[in-house]
Amino acid sequence: MMCTEMTCIVKVLKSIDRFKNGVSVMNQQLLSYEMNNSNFWKITIGLTLASTLNFANLYVTQPLLPLFTREFQISPTVASLAISLTTFSLVFALLFFGFLSDRIGRLVILKWTLILSIIPLFVIPLVPYFWWILIWRFITGVTIAGLPAVAIAYISEEISIQAQGLAVSFYIASNALGGMFGRVLSGHFADAFSWQAGFYTLGVFGLIVSFLCLWMLPKSKFFKRHNRSYKQDIAGMAVHLKNPKLAFAFLFGLMLQVAFSAVWTYLPFYLEREPFNLSIQIISLLYMTYFFGVIGSPLAGRLSTRNSLVTIIMFGLLIMLVGTVITSISQLVYVVCGLSLVCLGFFIVHSLVSAWVGTTATHHKSGATSFYLFSYYMGTTIGGTAVGGVWSQFGWFGVVAISVILPAISGLLFMTVARKKKTIVKEEVK
C-alpha cells in the first residue's frame, strides 16, 4: 500500500513538472520576438553582421597562399596550414563553447569571442615569421568558434517559431557572404597594396561590427541554465554513432568538406600557373561564385518540400561533382562555370544533410547537430592540408580526382543507409 501511494505521488509530481514545462514553453512563445518586433531585426541583423565578419576572418588567408609560399619560402602544403590550423582549433572550441553556453549563457560568449577575434587581424601583419602567423591563426580559430556555437540556440530561444526560419536563413546566407567577402578583400588588397593592408581593413570592419553587436543584440530572456555534466554532454553526442544512418551522414559531411576545401585551397596555385597566369586580385574575384551558394540553400529548402530530402541531396551532389570535373578544362570560362556549380551543389547538399541529421536524431538533437558540425569543420582541416601531397604529385587533376571520388563514395553509402527502413536503435544515455 505504501509503495502504491509513493508511486502515485511520484506520478503526480512528474505531471506537475510536465505541466509547468508546458506553461513555460507557451509563455516563451507568447513573449518571444515576432518579425514585427524591432528586437527580431536587431538579433537578425546583428548575427548576420557577426557571421559575415567571422567567415571573412576564417577564409581571409585562402587567396594569399601562393603569396605566402614565395614570401616565406615554404611549400603549398605548409602554406595551407594558415587555414587548416584555424579550422582545427575552431572544431574543438566549437564543442567547448557549446557546452559552456548551456551553463553561462549565449551572449557573454558571443560578444567576448567576437571582440577577441579582431586582435589577430592587427597582430598578424606585424609578425616576421610564418610560424607566428600559424600561432595567431590557431588563436583565431578558437575565438571565431563562439558565434557558431551559440547563434542557433540564441535564435531558437529568443525568436518565435514562426519567425525563426527567416532569422536562420539570413544567418546561414551570411556564412557564404562572409567567406566570399574575406577572400575577395584580401586578394584585392594584396595586389593593390599589400596583404597586410587587407588584414588591417578587415580588422577595422571587425571593430565596427563588434560595436554594433554590443549595442544591438538584446539580452537573453529565455535562457535556462543546464545542470548536466560535461560527461553527459559528450555522451549525448557520441550516442549517435550507434545509429548507422547518422554515422554515415557524419562521414558524408566530412568528405563533402574535404572535397570542397581541397578545390578552394589549391585553386589559387592552379590559376597562377600556365595557361592562366592570373594575378591574386583576379583569382580572388572567382570567389564571387559563392553567390551560387547563397542561392543554393533556399533553393534546396524549396525543392525539399516537393521531393524527399535524400533525392535532393543526391541531386545536389551530382551538380557538385559535375562542376568539379568541369574545372579541369584549361579555359577560364569553364573554370568559372565549374566553380559556380560546385558552390551551388555543395550548399544544396550541406543545408539538407544538416536538416536531415536534425530530423533523424530521435533525441539529443543538439548533440547530433554538434557532431555533424564537428565532422564538417574537420573536413576543412583535412581538405586544406592533407590534399597538399596530392597537389604536389599530381597537380590539379589529382585534386579533382580526390574531390570527386571521396564525396561520391560517401554519398552512395549515405543514400544506401538513409533509404533503408527505419530501425530501432538503442540510444539511451544514463
Image: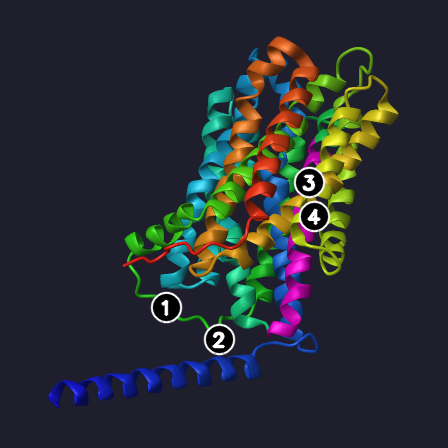
Quadrant of residue 277 within the rendered picture: top right
Disc on the earlier residue, 4 or 1? 1
What residue range appears in magenta? 160-186
Name the residue rendered at 64%, 29% in the picture. 62
Name the residue rendered at 23%, 88% in the picture. 9
Name the residue rendered at 61%, 51% in the picture. 51
Between label 3 and label 1, give the one nearer the viewer.
3
Left or right side of 5 for 68: right
Q: Does the magenta segment cover residue 165?
A: yes
Between label 1 and label 2, give the one nearer the viewer.
1
Q: Residues within 10 Å of mark 1 (few under 14, many from 20)?
A: few
Q: Could you tell me which secondary element the residue under label 1 belongs to?
A: loop
Q: Does the magenta segment cover residue 162?
A: yes
Q: Can you identify the residue that label 1 sits on?
A: 225
Q: Can you identify the residue that label 4 sits on?
A: 311
Type of amino acid under label 4: Thr
- Label disc, if present, on residue 221 of the rendered structure: 2
How far separated are the C-alphas under marks 2 and 3? 36 Å
Visible residue check, residue 181 = no
Q: Residues within 10 Å of mark 2 (few under 14, many from 20)?
A: few
Type of amino acid under label 1: Arg
- Label disc, if present, on residue 334 of the rendered structure: none
How far separated are the C-alphas under marks 4 and 1? 39 Å
Disc on the earlier residue, 3 or 4? 4
Residue 66 location (% of width, % of height) = 66, 18
Q: Could you tell me which secondary element the residue under label 2 belongs to?
A: loop
- Find the residue positioned furthest to the left: 2
340 up-or-down from 238: above or below: above
Q: Can you identify the residue that label 3 sits on?
A: 346
